[in-house]
Image (tube, rainbow, N blue to C red):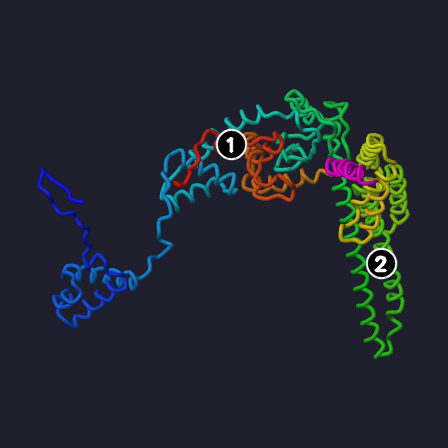
Amino acid sequence: MVSTIIGNPVSPVKSFRSAAAQMAPLRRQFLAVAGMARNQPLSDLARENDVSRNFIYDQIEKANRALDAAFRPKEDDDQRILFTIPVTKQWIRQVVLSAILDCHSSTRGVKDFLSNICDSEIAIGTIHNIVMAAVEKARIVNSEEDLSKIRVGAHDEIFQGDPVLVGADPFSTYCYLLAQEPSRDAATWAIHLLDLLERGLHLEYTVADAGQGLRAGQAEAWPGVPCRGDVFHAESEMGKMTIYLENRAYGCIGAREALERKMERARTKSRGQSFSKKLAIARKEETEAIQLIDDLRLLAQWMREDVLSLTGPDASTRRELFDFIVAEMKIREHLAPHRIRPVRIAMENQRDQLLAFADDVDRQLVGISRKRKVPLKDVRSLFELGRLAPDDPLYWLKDSALWDRLGLDKYPVVAKDVDEVLENSVRASSMIENLNSRLRCYFFLRREVGQDYLELLRFFLNHRRYPRSRKDGHAGKSPAEILQGAILPHWLEQLGFTRFRKAA
């Protein structure tokens, strides 16, 4: 085909690629090395390969850059800039609050941090003002939160100079009461509980220790809400008693062994009879101490694993066992009255409160039996199966027998109902003890806490997300999010701050 331009015929245009453009990478590499070696003139090298001298110079330059990169000292990764932060007044305010709440820092610690890391001086009074500004916003958030979803409360008192009254939901760990008062009497507790009632807190029951003011205040403010006993404190007191008696038994063993060594040395001098009476007394004391600790350790084990455990016999049987254990403690009371008597009296006075959970469990198991139309005996057997570990062969024997009796249609639904009973029954205020342990990390920094600081602290603890948790669905969520069942903004964002985000 012939192309024409303004009527004149021209030859078709052919595409043309030079030798340099067609040259393979390895050949270019050879030219670069040969040019750097200078074994022959570059003009000869260019003519032999049908390229220009400038092309040879370009290949030599590429090779030089590659060599420089290969032999250049590596850049210190520690000095490499990862990202930059725009330091504004708002950012500094966030740092102050995060250092105090996330890092448990003191006010002077925050001042030193900003001075050392940011080369920025800040006054103690400014830090105080930043915290107080956050307190006002936190107080508003605290007062507007819905408490109607909380059905069980755990109450306790912690001391930082004046007592601090604490109340929390044992399921979501949401803290709804954190107040410092000059007194912990019934009137003080009643005032706070009435205020919570006005804010929508209506509980089925509470769990608390034997504090008289706490219980009297609840009876006055919430007359229809039972206050169950806290098995954590009861078991703890029995544990302290057995530890003391065990140490005393070891002391008696050591005293007897020391007398025996003295007697052996005295016998070499024909004076062994001088230690005979002392050794006989020591042996008697040792026997009594060992027998006492063996008995009380067994009684404490029965109380912990059979009477106060969540899975166990029915409430009436537990009461009989409870009374038996207390009676046995009383029989041995004279052997260590200063240790056994206070624990025995406390257990005796709190029996019905400590076992209130067992009555509730019985009612729920009866309800499951009627709802699912299965024998109560089988429901209780499934409930008590929780006492055995899954790796115990007896567990699978009993589980298989229950499958045979209940069948494929009844076993799964009854097991699910029983699991809900196990999950929703509260016997101890151990969650409050956990909360108290976290509070102490903040209290030790301040001689006087103050209600303003407690208001901010309550807000922070309720909205700080757990990095990990043994409970399903709690990791990565805050107590407020667990309680409300919704995702809430970060606690800094709720205080009106815009958090720093790295560029993508």
Q: Residues within 10 Å of mark 2 (few under 14, many from 20)?
A: some
Q: Is residue 110 visible?
A: yes
Q: Which residue is disc 2 drawn over? A: 290
Which mark sits nearer the N-terminus, 2 or 1?
2
Image coords of residue 403 (percent x, y): 82, 44
Question: Of 138 and 180, which appears nearest the observer?
Answer: 138
Image coords of residue 327 (percent x, y): 90, 44
Residue occupying the point 13% across, 47% down: 11
Image coords of residue 231 (percent x, y): 77, 40
Check disc 1 and give the amino acid type: Pro
Q: Quadrant of residue 282?
A: bottom right
Calculate the distance from the C-alpha at mark 2 to the C-alpha at mark 1.
59 Å
**Quadrant location of the C terminus in the rendered image:** top left
Q: Is residue 213 above or below residue 64?
A: above
Image coords of residue 324 (percent x, y): 90, 44
Element type at mark 1: loop
